[in-house]
Image (cartoon, rainbow, N blue to C red):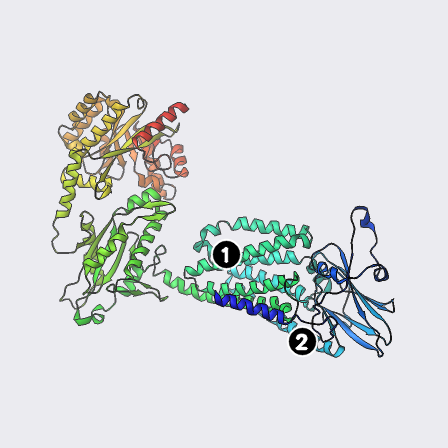
Amino acid sequence: MRTLFGTGLFICWLLGAFASASTWSTDGRYISSALPTAVESRGRHSEQTRPPLTAAEALDSLTFSTEQFAASTRLSTDIYWHKLGFPFQPAASQHILDISNYMLDELDVFVFHDGKLHRQWRRGDRQPWSPWDGRYAGIWFPIQHPANVELDVLIRKSSTGPMLLPLRIFEPAAHIEQVASRYKVWAMAVGALMILLLHNTVVFLLSRYPAYGYYLIFHVAVLLSLGVTQGFGPWFLPMAINQWMAQHILSLYTMAAWSIFQFSLHFLQLRTRLPHWWKRRRHIDLLFLLALLASIVLPERLYATPYALIQVGLSVLSIYWGIQVRRQGFAPAGLYLLSWSVFLLGAFVGNATFRTLLPFNTLTEYALLVCTLLQLLGFTFSLAIRARHLEQENNVRTLTNPQSELPNRQFFLRYVAKSPWSSELPNNASGPTMVLIQLVSLHDLSTAVGPARSAQVTGLLAQRLDQALSHEPSVIPHTLPNQRVARVIDMAEDQWIFLLHPSASLDKVLYRLEPQLNEPIQVDGSEFQQMFAMGVAKPQAQAQDHDMVSLFQKAQMAADENGTASALWSEYQTGWVEQQQDQLYLVVELTQAIRHRRFEFVVQPKVDLSSMAIHSGEVLLRWHHPEKGSIGPDVFIPLAERVGLIFKLTQVVLNLTFEWVALHRAALKSCSLAINISARDLLQPAFAQDTLALCQKYQLEPARFILEITETTALSDKAMAIENADLLRAAGFSLSIDDFGAGYSSMQNIHRLAPQEIKIDRQFVRELTINSTHETLCRSLITLSQDLHTCATAEGIETAEQLALLKQWGCHSGQGYYLYRPLAPDDFLTLLRTQQNGH
């Protein structure tokens, strides 16, 4: 900050160093003192037809005063006159008046000898004129001063743009040198601009990269606008065209601003790096279009301030984008920022000079030209660096996961699996220890929030793990082709591995890592908590050649075992024990929860797709453990089936549901409830009788309930299952086959169980709009249900397109997050009352 402040003071001092000059000095320095000035008002209303003053009338009738000079340099609709008086001198002499503002609409110079008009010239952008001898060298006037003659020079100016009058007076020989210097500056500027333009045109034709196209538009707009403002436009364009561009200079500036905006969008890769800004680009395009129309319709003096605001806004936005993208590791953004900063310096100096905030001198005159050339050169180099950077990025992209930006499975197979670890480790150690972290609920997460958001969550978690392990010296690092160092290898969306030196303390590393795994992930205002399993695999000490692929497979097995255990990690060992102590603990907890009914339930509405009315609700069991927190049904239901607790768990959900319905008979009178039971329940001899006894206990009609049979096991031809199904159906219960098509022997179960409903599994519904096979399956299952006179219910409806197709095919009912999410019981009752009142 101190360096920036010091640089600013130095620049201000340097700019001021050129400002001092006497009023009538003929040494070629810009006149900084106020000139005698008079104003000729254009008048209003009826006075607008008043003819302008002639030069003689102005000399006789106007009162010239230096007090008017400051107003004459600002934007104005008035006509201003300046007067230069030269005293008597005994010998004849000649002076050259040189004016460096090439954007005045009207510029007239009149020379009076002893009060009589001797000569006059026109040099404005709205006035036809041509150079003296065919060679254009800017705007200058030869003033002959005869001996013993009073010489007065009147300068008349009017413009809708900047009214600044940078004036210098030369001796003829000095002006010749000045013209030669000016030619050199113009030649270097035009040469550099044309060479860069030719180079970038060739590159654009070869690459067809959009950023180059917008850069070329910007380059051409800069070339034309600099030709107007710096005076070298008539060198390569007819005077009439150059004058026309001078009259529309702000329209040209607006086109340049729009092109640099588009260039920045593509150069900085905002589509992928800042997508929220990329989505807003059309709105900004519309603003530029309106600004361009305003620049055409409005006079320059009225549009100057709005354009300045556009320029400031674009500058701030571009620098902000550059900083954000540079922070993401996009190296070419650094040179982009530097180039843009240099241009802003030149633009600031140019605007401040033409608004009389800075003195007009040699430095400020060419500041914009020099800075613009540096910017164009910087952008050209930036594009070249960007091409090399993207080539490197493409190489890295094949070796990294796009979400986490960590090494992926391809990197593992290409570099890690083939690495000679035994030669790199000290004391002939056996090899590194592999730790594999595996998410156990990725499917549920993906189903709930969609695959894209699920990948975002897991990518953030992987980055968090890599950051945490970067402080562990015992973790073996991996270097990517772009020299980025990572500790974690992203093997899959739900699997990550890292390697430890054999001497590392496994306990300390993993326990220090645990808080990072348990900390929720915040994405778009939502919080996600992921369950995980960790597996550890160590190579055999006597092995000479370590197979990393085999080690990975062992770590996978350990992580799978750890998924059903409460330990932080499991280590691979020969002969796994089916039931470990930690798993028994969870079984004990589940047993206690069943005994004391420590469960809750939520209700997900089921909707009649023809009327979109709620006609039923599915009861979904939830278990919140006092220490482990929420334990999903995908964990405790398979566990209950595996250890024989599923029947008791079903009794819990039946009791909870029946008790709740009994308390809210009136509110639920028009709504049936679906209860999930396992196919294993139908294999229990007394299941039907016990279920009917519960109905009698709570005085409920079986017809109010649907029993959804989850196909977690094959029913085969067991008579007990068929008998239970017949009894339940005869008593009035409706039977439904849940997750139809994804379980065991679904077609045979239709015949055996004769269900009133089949529920199309959510995996078919989720992809029916993108997977032709799933589309065919859904449509066929709906047709099958119609032929069998059963109700088809689609699970997992998440989009309007899915809903429209299902309704088109005649699907009876559906449920899913697009319709309703699972609700607390009281919220479900409120929803029902709202529906009833609405009808």
Question: Which circle, 1 or 2, is nearer the viewer?
Answer: 2
Amino acid, disc 1 = Leu
Residue 684 lies, in percent from the top left, at 14, 31
Instruction: State the count of labels.
Output: 2
Residue 518 lies, in percent from the top left, at 26, 50
Q: Quadrant of residue 513?
A: bottom left
Mark 2 neighbour density, 10 Å: few (under 14) some (14–19) many (20 or more):
few
Question: Which SS class for mark 2?
Answer: helix
Relative height, residue 32 to residue 534 (above, below): below
Question: Which SS class for mark 1?
Answer: helix
Q: Which residue is mark 2?
A: 181
- Residue at 59% of width from left, 70% of height from top? 13
Q: Quadrant of the C terminus?
A: top left
Badge number at residue 321: none
Residue 6 lies, in percent from the top left, at 52, 68
Q: Which residue is mark 1?
A: 265
Q: Is residue 524 left or right of residue 663?
A: right
- Residue at 31% of width from left, 25% of height from top? 671
Q: Is residue 24 left or right of residue 571?
A: right
Amino acid, disc 2 = Ser
Of residues 485 and 21, which is closer to you in this image?
Answer: 21
Using the rendered image of the protein, determine whether residue 194 is visible from the camera's viewpoint. no
Residue 351 lies, in percent from the top left, at 62, 61
Of mark 1 and mark 2, the one earlier in the sequence is: 2
Relative height, residue 323 to residue 276 (above, below): below
Of residues 387 and 286, which is closer to you in this image?
Answer: 286
- Residue at 56% of width from left, 51% of height from top? 285
